[in-house]
Image (cartoon, rainbow, N blue to C red):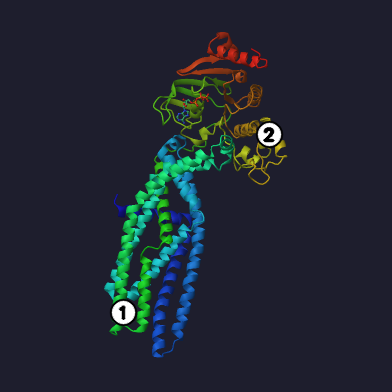
């Protein structure tokens, strides 16, 4: 694609996005641009006429009134344009965030977020949009248009004296403007694409110094010098690249500026010559000087050009990001397809390889769970238990074989995936109110979230927030508080139990209780089985004593399922499960606990 085509495409994309964000702004804006230009033209012409009238001793009031009217109207129109720009900026920022979220959320799974290029693009655009908050980018676009429109008046004035000088200065300004914009484009493109992966690393390192979740380790292990040093090295390397990329474009822009200054000097010298020989009068000289100066409207406009160039490049990259995501398999929203009540789970001959790996993590796996059964999945570290769960809820599609919830594919339809409620080991602790942490939706079914928290044995959580469901679970907010690890787990449990009330047919606990002691975990799992009776439940844990009350236990090995049966059946079989159970029981007993076989 040629540079011109790309610029044109960028322009079209920008205005399409701008109109969608604030249709009224794109109507009022041009009106104000024209008003500012007319006012500026009137001021310039009337000033010249006023000077002539004074010199000739003619009446001056009409020209004076026009000068004053123009001088008032122009800044008022610009101020109104700024106000439109401010609203437009708010709307555009909101739309930008929505587009980034759209690209990150589509498609259905999470595999695309592990693609370094895509993750880099999302991170770079997010940062770019965040850093534009408070900057009047779109306001600058309107201002640039108004300034350029004012330039038309200047062009008419200069051309009426000498068309070839007007053309010469105009061309020099356009060339300089183009060279400056090209320089800005290099900077923006570089910020938004080329070094985004390194920038992401630099930002990550720096954020470890400021975010709360890393604060304890950073202090205790004395990581500050190392993090700062790594950050500085990465940041400098990123900027070395960008400075190299910018240097050529900057040199060309400077050369353009020198050429332009020479052109303006020559035009002024010619004007002086004309005045000297009496070809132009004093009033005309005043008007023409203003005109030559006004032609700068077509050139580089400093910060205004920087900000409007940045706005255009951002919209183009956003369109590419969303367009790229749209090319990925879309999900259907066949709301009526998924049923209600306990769901059946079927994995048939499933093979799966993570996008960043070459070896499959799961190979030819078969697992069938009838509706309403409670099943525990156990196995050594890294054997693929969590991977199986991620496939079960459609976060990744399998390479081969099928995953079905009540006969439907959770990786293809949103409502099918919602049939699976999962609490992962690394469940999210939202820094929002307790109510939002449990309900996570607009719907506020009366009493449902209170019951869900009670079912999750969360009485002490309510005690911690003094019965106030609106307490923010982050001490960084006024009146906020933090919860213990166990209390957070109960909040997450309540969230999952609420999902069951809302129609989830499979409930999965993927080791969210690993931080608890054996007895507390066993209690939670037992309670979980009690309150979810009739729902298909899947428990994942290393601790075999915690899952022994599940109706069925599946032992996963590197090549698939190695044992499958109830706790008693597996003990009687005296295989891997029985050996692991006896080993864990012996350790627990030697630590002072008591275990039932
Ligand atoms: N996003 C990922 N990209 C690449 N490899 C991954 C990813 N997530 C997990 N793995 C790898 O896949 C394998 C299975 O991981 P998984 O988390 O499913 O095991 P697990 O049985 O749940 O382990 P644990 O008991 O330690 O939680 C491991 O080798 C792990 O390193």
Horizontal and vertical percent position of residue 99: 46, 47
> Which is more foreground, mark 1 or mark 2?
1
- Picture quadrant where residue 440 is located: top right
Instruction: Residue at the far left: name it.
Output: 164
SS type, badge 2: helix
Pick whichever of labels 1 and 2 is earlier in the sequence: 1
Horizontal and vertical percent position of residue 111: 44, 34
Above or below, comparing residue 375 to residue 104 in the picture: above
Above or below, comparing residue 20 to residue 230 in the picture: below
Residue at mark 2: 451
Horizontal and vertical percent position of residue 30: 43, 65
Q: Within 8 Å: ligand 1 and the Cβ of disc 1?
A: no
Residue at mark 1: 272
Q: Is residue 319 visible?
A: no
Horizontal and vertical percent position of residue 531: 65, 27
Report, in whole angstroms, how far the alpha carbon at label 1 lies from the one at label 2: 88 Å
- Name the foreground residue: 438 vs 216: 216
What crowding class fits label 2: few (fewer than 14 Cα within 10 Å), some (14-19), or many (20 or more)?
A: some
- Name the foreground residue: 474 vs 354: 474
């Amino acid at each position: 694609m040629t540079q011109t085509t790309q610029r044109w495409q960028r322009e079209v994309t920008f205005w399409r996005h701008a109109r969608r964000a604030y249709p009224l702004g794109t109507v009022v804006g041009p009106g104000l641009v024209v008003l500012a230009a007319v006012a500026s033209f009137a001021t310039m012409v009337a000033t010249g006429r006023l000077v002539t009238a004074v010199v000739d001793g003619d009446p001056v009031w009409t020209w004076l009134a026009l000068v004053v009217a123009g001088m008032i109207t122009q800044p008022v129109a610009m101020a109104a344009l700024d106000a439109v720009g401010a609203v437009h900026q708010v709307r555009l920022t909101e739309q930008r965030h929505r587009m980034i979220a759209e690209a990150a959320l589509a498609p259905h799974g999470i595999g695309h977020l592990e693609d370094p290029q895509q993750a880099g693009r999302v991170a770079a655009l997010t940062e770019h949009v965040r850093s534009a908050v408070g900057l009047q980018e779109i306001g600058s676009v309107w201002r640039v248009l108004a300034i350029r429109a004012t330039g038309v008046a200047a062009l008419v004035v200069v051309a009426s004296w000498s068309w070839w000088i007007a053309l010469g200065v105009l061309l020099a300004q356009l060339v300089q403007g183009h060279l400056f914009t090209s320089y800005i484009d290099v900077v923006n493109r570089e910020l938004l694409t080329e070094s985004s992966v390194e920038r992401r690393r630099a930002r990550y390192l720096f954020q470890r110094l400021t975010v709360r979740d890393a604060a304890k380790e950073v202090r205790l292990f004395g990581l500050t010098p190392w993090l700062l040093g790594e950050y500085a090295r990465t940041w400098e390397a990123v900027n070395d690249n960008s400075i190299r990329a910018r240097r050529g474009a900057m040199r060309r822009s400077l050369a353009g500026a020198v050429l332009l200054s020479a052109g303006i000097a020559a035009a002024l010298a010619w004007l002086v010559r004309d005045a000297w020989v009496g070809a132009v009068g004093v009033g005309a000289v005043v008007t023409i000087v203003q005109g030559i100066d006004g032609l700068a409207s077509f050139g580089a406009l400093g910060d205004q050009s920087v900000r409007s160039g940045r706005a255009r490049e951002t919209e183009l990259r956003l369109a590419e990001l969303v367009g790229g995501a749209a090319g990925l398999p879309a999900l259907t929203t066949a709301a009526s397809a998924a049923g209600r009540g306990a769901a059946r789970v079927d994995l048939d001959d499933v093979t799966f390889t993570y996008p960043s790996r070459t070896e499959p993590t799961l190979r030819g796996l078969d697992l069938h769970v009838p509706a309403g059964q409670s099943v525990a999945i156990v196995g050594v570290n890294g054997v693929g238990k969590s991977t199986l769960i991620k496939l079960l809820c459609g976060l990744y599609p399998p390479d081969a074989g099928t995953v079905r919830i009540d006969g439907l594919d959770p990786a293809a339809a949103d409502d099918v995936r919602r049939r699976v409620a999962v609490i992962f080991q690394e469940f999210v602790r939202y820094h929002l109110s307790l109510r939002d942490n449990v309900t996570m939706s607009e719907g506020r079914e009366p009493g449902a979230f209170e019951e869900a928290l009670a079912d999750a044995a969360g009485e002490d959580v309510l005690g911690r927030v003094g019965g106030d469901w609106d307490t923010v679970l982050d001490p960084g907010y006024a009146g906020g508080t933090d919860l213990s690890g166990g209390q957070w787990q109960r909040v997450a449990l309540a969230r999952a139990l609420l999902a069951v009330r809302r129609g989830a047919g499979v409930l999965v606990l993927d080791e969210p209780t690993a931080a608890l002691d054996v007895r507390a975990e066993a209690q939670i799992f037992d309670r979980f089985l009690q309150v979810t009776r009739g729902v298909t439940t899947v428990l994942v844990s290393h601790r075999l004593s915690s899952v022994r009350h599940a109706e069925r236990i599946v032992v996963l090995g590197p090549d698939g399922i190695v044992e499958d049966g109830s706790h008693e059946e597996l003990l009687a079989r005296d295989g891997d499960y029985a050996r692991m159970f006896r080993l864990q029981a012996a350790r627990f007993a030697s630590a002072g606990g008591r275990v039932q076989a």
